[in-house]
Amino acid sequence: MLKNSIQYDVLIIGSGAAGLSLALRLAGRLSVAVLSKSSLGEGSTLYAQGGIAAVLDKKDSVEKHIEDTLEAGAGLCDEKTVRYVVERGPNTIKWLLGHRVPFTLLDKEDASKGYHLTREGGHSERRVIHSEDATGKAIETTLQQQVRNHPGIQIYEHHLAIDLITEAKLGLSGNRCLGAYVLDKQAQRVSVFAAGNVILATGGASKAYLYTSNPDTSTGDGIAMAWRAGCRVANMEFNQFHPTCLYHPSAKSFLLSEAIRGEGGILRLADGTRFMPKFDSRADLAPRDVVARAIDHEMKRLGVDCVYLDISHKSEDFIIGHFPNIYARCLEYGYDMARSPIPVVPAAHYTCGGVMTDLAARTDLPGLYVIGESAYTGLHGANRMASNSLLECLVFAEAAASDILQQEARPGIATQLPAWDESKVEDSDERVVVSHNWDELRHFMWDYVGIVRTTKRLQRAKRRVDMLAMEINEYYGNFRISNDLIELRNLVEVADLIIRSALERKESRGLHYTLDYPERNIKTTQATVLTPGISKSGGLHVASGT
């Protein structure tokens, strides 16, 4: 073992469905460490309600699932990736069933009848397998228990990765990823983790926005670290806003599953008027980008704070049977969804872009993999179809595991990694700078880089993010790090990538809608790719292309 470092064959940064399933696939054959920035399992997977899309019904087909995904992605999906993921859907579900994930049965008294499949926006068939209305929780808690009980997996909770260590950063030839600097949040100590294979499974960056369905951990850590290490990112302008989050001052980040609309829920105005049919022939089952923009349009047109989701025309037994957790939670806030409509608003939900990877989850850096929401695989294109996200997490975790295990000789870390240097920093007496900048970032991202954009708004956002980046980098260089500072540094980095990407795309497509270019450019079929590099002034520059 290298002096001053903690060494494993595999270092997994992130503990959602992607990270935990990868750990279970590798454990017993390699030494594995899993880092969780909070308690194990706290992340976006835990709060995913809907389910996992997979072809499990005889009426359905792989081709239909592929066609639906390509249509939702608005011409920017990589068809090869879509086919790769969709074809592996059924076996992915079998793997989860083999690990005893409790999916909902059609008949609780007769398991032979199979599993209940629901339908969500963009899907032409019922293909979403679920565990009542808390699928993510069922998957996360099941896998978490098995990871905790596995002797071949070492868990580090409340550990936040600061930055990746690469050969280039150490002044060596090549640019292999060698490990990471990691903050133990409880001990307030930075450790060096060395690994022959590093996997980023850190989730998305929706905390860059003022209103989000995501937990506080969604701060774009993996995307920012990979970018700083020299990886390309793609399609960062495509931020999915979930149409239906509960509108209530105390209901922080509470999502109302798309499955409610899949089972007959209708969006209405305060006077009961149904509005989705005038925006799309699929009405309430249109893809999320269409529904979110329609809600945004109606709210601005009428000057109201919310619209309403109504499933009260269904029986109380039906609602409680299909949505027991959502029903109970709404009652806590004073809403009985079996008797009246529920107030809803859109909120930032999913980062469709991310670090560019191939079909083995490999990045531009040897030894570095990215899986889950942090990655850009080409699956989602300009808009993610409902319930394809958990599928992507699990399929690419398997792909990464296969690639790592097929290596004939896993490269060890021959170079001693330098310890974290705090000799020239001091404790900050101006922590208000971090909290103020955090609030400013989330406000201008919501106002200027939200559901509907303009070039002028994006330019305003760019000027503000540049100023914040300068302040944060100066602060980072002079004071001891903290959880909030690390997360803010990453969010500012990712916000800048989102804004740059949005300025590059001179059209409206999928989740990116700009009033300056309201039509789709049918000649454009490329992802927006940003490439880190060194300019003459020593800063970063970006280039757009494939």
Image (cartoon, helix red, strand yellow):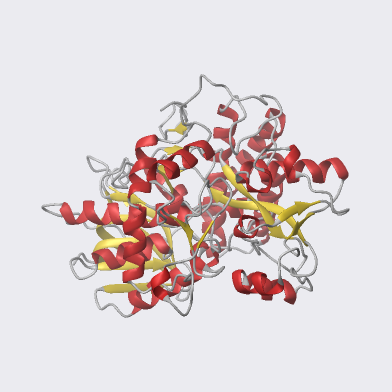
Q: Horizontal placement of 216 versus 343: left or right?
A: left
Residue located 24% across and 74% down the image: 152
- The answer to which quarter of the image holds residue 506 is top right
At x 41% / y 75%, what residue is drawn?
Answer: 111
Residue 481 visible here: no
- Using residue 291 as the reference point, say whether residue 11 is left or right of it: left
| Residue furthest to the left | 408
Instruction: Depth check: give the residue in front, 121 or 453.
Output: 121
Q: Is residue 409 visible?
A: yes
- Residue situated in front as seen by the camera: 391 or 1: 391
Give the position of the N terminus as an image quadrant.
bottom left
For this rendering, which residue is in front, 474 or 217?
A: 217
At horizontal 42% and vertical 39% (from top left) the residue drawn is: 378
Vertical placement of 241 versus 456: above or below?
below
Residue 403, position as x, y percentages in the image: 22, 51
* Drawn side of residue 92 relative to residue 384, left or right: left
Image quarter in which the C terminus is found: top left
Q: How many marks?
A: 0
Q: Is residue 251 above or below residue 345?
A: below
Residue 262 on image: x %, y %? 61, 55
- Across and down, in percent, residue 510 comes to 58, 36
Question: How far across and how far down the image is residue 250, in percent?
Answer: 75, 69
Residue drawn at (30%, 73%) of the image = 154
